[in-house]
């Protein structure tokens, strides 16, 4: 989004530790991981998203040769600003450090992250970054939820809702635009008692949010033959959705979701 532009492109993608379509990132050499990352970077360059939310992004992990994935993608895809929130950290002979990352064309005025628990492996969490856009300060939340337990996902969404309430992002009279919330929710939108619907009900009570993608063609996992929609972008009413689509892509076991927005008013 150039200065004065009224359009905004947002993409969310679980990059699966940079392993591409492999079952385990540790099967790759350093050159293999870098090849996979260059494919991700080529995708980002093609779609020209202004904000990119990524999940399963490593800072320094043994299984992908200690490559800082977000720094690599930032350089390859030419993004001016980046933030990585590490939700898993383990030392020793087999160190791990990974979480959710954000790439953006806009300056990051403030960023923070929160893990949902204290596990050193498999922990989920979210990143919140306040971006300095031409239209105002835009909070973006990049979320990754547990894949095993519906009850745990609901608890995690409650933690996210508590965070939003404390920030007053969805209250009238704040200096912020209403937040965009996106990520890998490991939950389908049609399940009334699961995480996506739980969060959607909360956001709709605050203001008239939209959820994308929906309907036919909204499945994102697995990328080879997607049958589950797990990745979503929640859009506040301050934006008109010009399009929302799942991209046919094989850079990960998830397909990316891309929305193009136009600010209202």
Image: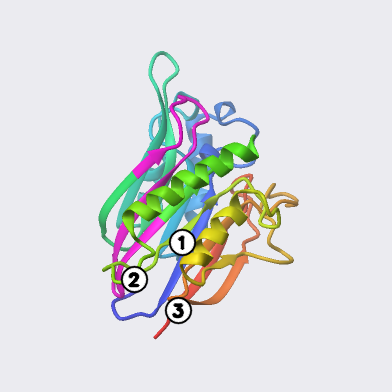
- The residue under label 3 is 262
Of mark 1 and mark 3, the one earlier in the sequence is 1
Give the label on residue 172, or none: 2
- The residue under label 1 is 45
Provide the secondary structure element on which disc 1 rests: helix
Relative to 76, is 28 on the left or the right?
right
Task: Check contact, mark 1 vs mark 3: CB within 8 A.
Answer: no
Extent of the magenta region: 113-140
Residue 41 horizontal/vertical position (percent): 47, 53
Task: Check contact, mark 2 vs mark 3: CB within 8 A.
Answer: no
Q: Give the overall secondary structure of the magenta segment.
A: strand
Magenta region includes residue 217 = no
Of mark 1 and mark 2, the one earlier in the sequence is 1
Residue 103 lies in quadrant: bottom left
Residue 201 horizontal/vertical position (percent): 57, 60
Of mark 2 and mark 3, the one earlier in the sequence is 2
């Amino acid at each position: 989004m150039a200065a004065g532009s009224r359009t905004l492109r947002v993409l969310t993608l679980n990059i699966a530790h940079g392993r591409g379509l492999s079952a385990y990132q540790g099967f790759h050499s350093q050159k293999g991981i870098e090849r996979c990352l260059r494919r991700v970077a080529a995708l980002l360059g093609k779609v020209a998203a202004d904000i990119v939310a990524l999940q399963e992004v490593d800072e320094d992990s043994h299984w992908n040769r200690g490559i800082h994935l977000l720094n690599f993608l930032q350089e390859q895809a030419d993004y001016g600003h980046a933030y990585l929130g590490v939700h898993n950290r383990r030392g020793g002979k087999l160190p791990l450090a990974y979480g959710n990352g954000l790439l953006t064309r806009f300056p990051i005025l403030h960023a923070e992250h929160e893990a949902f628990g204290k596990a050193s492996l498999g922990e989920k969490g979210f990143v919140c970054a306040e971006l300095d856009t031409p239209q105002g300060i835009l909070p973006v939340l990049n979320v990754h939820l547990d894949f095993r337990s519906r009850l745990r996902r609901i608890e995690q969404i409650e933690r996210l809702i508590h965070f939003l309430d404390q920030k007053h992002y969805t209250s009238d009279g704040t200096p912020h635009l209403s937040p965009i919330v996106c990520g890998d929710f490991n939950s389908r939108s049609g399940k009334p008692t699961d995480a996506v619907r739980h969060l959607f009900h909360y956001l709709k009570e605050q203001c008239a949010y939209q959820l994308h993608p929906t309907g036919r063609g909204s499945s994102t996992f697995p990328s080879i033959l997607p049958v589950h929609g797990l990745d979503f972008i929640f859009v506040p009413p301050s934006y008109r959705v010009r399009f929302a689509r799942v991209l046919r892509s094989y850079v990960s076991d998830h397909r990316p979701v891309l929305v193009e927005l136009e600010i209202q008013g």
